[in-house]
Amino acid sequence: IIYTFPLLTHQSFFVDDLGRSLYGGLGWSGNGRPLSDFIFYIINFGTPIIDASPLPLMLGIVILALALSCVREKLFGDDYITASLCFMMILANPFFIENLSYRYDSLTMCMSVAISIISSYVAYQYKPINIIISSILTIAFLSLYQAALNTYAIFLLAFIISDVVKKNSISNITKNTASSVAGLIVGYFAYSYFIAKRLVTGSYN
């Protein structure tokens, strides 16, 4: 909250914000992000959508914080200080500040990152049902913001390193890693074929 306070108190119009605030349109589906359209359609009770900033940013930060709290014990145990400092790097970096600057997209971009973290965490527990759940979550976060794919990979690596440090068996680490990779691959190809192939249009996208 402290880091994003300048945006919460003075969030200017950033790139696509101006068009959406003027015309109240959606338009994310053409970018391969239909779930963003759905979420804003629901919370605005249809179209035109309204500019409710900084509420989308506040909701996005809360959702992202909840996702990080779910994986905190796996990575850091009861070391809350180290967990807070490490997780802060997700928000407090020069790359993610651009995402937080959007008056509209900040919500769905934060949601996408949050879901990708949960998807990676769920899949890193070797069970067939977890692969299915992770695949569905992968489709969801890609339908919100495709760049969150990087977050999935980063947290998978973090889980592997955590297990190595804890001296977990190589067989368990291998199974969990394979499970996580399988969930990602299945979800990615399902998204690419059923969503991106049918919705993404134009040279820009």
Image (tube, helix red, strand yellow):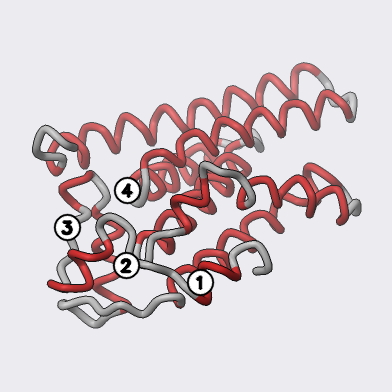
Q: What element carries label 4?
A: loop
Amino acid, disc 2? Ile
Q: Is mark 2 on a helix, strand or loop?
A: helix
Q: What element carries label 3?
A: loop
Q: Mark 2 points at which residue?
A: 39
Q: Name the residue under label 1.
A: 59
Whether the residues at callouts 2 and 3 have beta carbons within 8 Å, the answer is: no
User: Residue 31: x, y in percent?
Assistant: 21, 45
| Rendered-image quadrant of the N terminus | bottom right
Q: Residue at (51%, 37%) from the top-left corner? A: 131
Q: Residue at (45%, 50%) from the top-left corner? A: 98
Q: How crowded is mark 3: few (under 14 residues within 10 Å), some or many (20 or more)?
A: some
Q: Which of marks 1 and 3 is nearer the N terminus?
A: 3
Q: Distance between the residues labelled 1 and 4?
A: 18 Å
User: Residue 14: x, y in percent?
Assistant: 33, 59
Mark 1 or mark 2, whichever is nearer to me: 1
Q: Which of 148 and 193 is in front in this view?
A: 148
Q: Name the residue under label 3.
A: 27
**Residue 125 located left or right of residue 61:** right
Q: Name the residue under label 4.
A: 143
Q: How crowded is mark 4: few (under 14 residues within 10 Å), some or many (20 or more)?
A: many
